[in-house]
Amino acid sequence: MTDLEDLYREIILDHYRSPRNSGELETPPAHRAEGFNPLCGDEIVVYLLVADDGTIADIKIGGQGCSISQSSASMMSAAVKGKTVAQVRDLMKSFKGLMSIAADGAELAEPSPSEIRELGDLAALRGVVKFPTRIKCATLSWNTLDQALAELDA
Amino acid sequence: MTKAPDFAALKKDFPILHTERNGRPLVFLDSAASSQRPTQVLDAMDWMYNHAYANVHRGVYGLAEAATNAYESARLKVARFIGSPDSSEVIFTKNATEALNLVARSWGGANLGDGDAIVLTTMEHHANIVPWQMMAAERGFEIRWIPLGENGQLDLTDLDVLLDGAKMLSVTSMSNVLGTITPLDRLISAAHAAGAKVCIDACQSVPHMRTRVDEMGADFVAFSGHKMLGPTGIGVLWGRHELLEEMPPFLGGGGMISNVTTEGFMPDAVPSKFEAGTPPIVEAVGLGAAIDYLEAIGMDHIRQHEIELTSYALRTLSERLGQAITIHGLSEPAQRGGVMSITLDGVHAHDVSQVLDGYAVAVRPGHHCAKPLMRELGVNATARASFYLYNDTSDVDVLADALIEAHRFFAT
């Protein structure tokens, strides 16, 4: 498999062409966060609705961007729906590990096989690591989700 | 006009253009971001470091004098190159961005306040927007915008209304996204008639076409060295002597004073007043060597070469990609520079550039530091290919091949 084919795996192109959970949610009750990639101008809007029991009741994605940022957002939305906020934070950590990004002050750890299993479709994005300029594309939606979650706590 | 040089033979002067990326020969189409440089420039800088380097305007020893002479000769070369009769009107800065910040901060600081207005265009690079916005936030003056009109040119319908009461018009000479050459004659005369000063962001035009500040009529002109075969770390602000005289200093430090006491300081005369600290000495010499190289070819020949190449590219890309490609901006090559923003149907610019990189074709994806313009164009990113004297039709052919491949990869 060439690097380019590894970067653009079929599952990534599928999420790009048919994005899951695209749209908007009414705010409130949903929370809205916007993320920008200042280098390329990509924009992601995350609408997040958390149920009383602390699970993600619904999530919608807006904005525009390249295949990597759009498919990553689509996969993320599918992966977090129905999970608790704590589970989403764990998933975020595993995904950033896949992207070779360590949390502040933490040692960089490769995700374990069980974490990779947990990532599901998202693991297809691991080819991105070979193209460092594209890591920001893949993590844009997650950073935006992180902002939306921070707003919940506020 | 002198005899046209053999452009194909010039490529040998640029070692980097003979390197490979991903196992293929490099096709460099990103000169609008930064050009490559010939060995003549690198050799001149190397020679200076090895034989004639010391700090300038300080030592009385022979070596310091030689360095000062080399630095000041570069200033003379720049002045001659842009048609300034007075070399003290040439100020060396870090880059064009710093030159524009100098105008906004120093001239703007002395002349703009609450109730004043300046005029920009939505075609500007962020470097000609943000410094003014920073000053406006402090001083409370108004920023008015000349909008984009049909086909990538400015809409000047309301020009006189926008300029009414304005103190400054700051405008690009050539769009870094669309390559549009702006109608400077009309803009400058309208601004002066309204009593406004004019600042030109000439980053994209100075490297590619003849510049005559004495004929242009502007008050300030900013450009950078690294886009015109020179090194990074050097830019130029040209300004009218009488305006520079009146303006307060920009940065403070050594080299820009005539006297300092515990009570205060007296600034030096122009241009030293605006060159605080050790300047980019060897970079200035490198820029001088770049100017020698450009003048040996002739700016009119360079312009002609780029018109022909742009014309070939517009034709080739349209023919080979048909409906799949949109080339933004003017369709008449003589009205635009060799800068071409492309969108490929169904393929994001980032992905276009990624596939092109696989073919060793270097183009820039994104908003090109011109987000207001991108918004007016209704796109959030384009892939930009830009040409210079070392590019030829074979580069365009490889670009077309790679674009077809990118379209095939994503659209099927």
Image (spheres, rainbow, N blue to C red):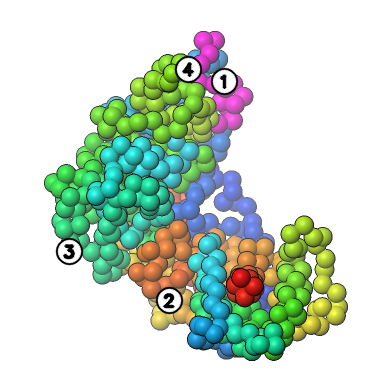
Q: Tell me if residue B349 comes above or below residue B125 in the rendering.
A: below
Within-10-Å neighbours for mark 4: few <14, some 14–19, many 20+: few
Image: magenta residue range: B45-61
Q: Nearer the viewer, mark 3 or mark 2?
A: 3
Q: Which mark is residue B325?
A: 2
| Distance (Cα) linking label 2 and label 4 | 65 Å
| Distance (Cα) linking label 2 and label 1 | 53 Å
x and y percent of residue B349 in the render? 51, 70
Q: Mark 1 — residue?
A: B54
Snapshot quadrant of residue A136: bottom right
**Reading the chain from its start, which is encountered first: label 2 or label 4?**
4
Q: Tell me if residue B378 comes above or below residue B126 in the rendering.
A: below
Q: Mark 2 belongs to which amino acid?
A: Ile
Establish whether labels 1 and 3 are both on one chain: yes
Q: Mark 3 — residue?
A: B157
Q: Tell me if residue A42 comes above or below residue B112 in the rendering.
A: below
The residue under the point 29% across, 45% down is B113
Q: Which mark is residue B262?
A: 4
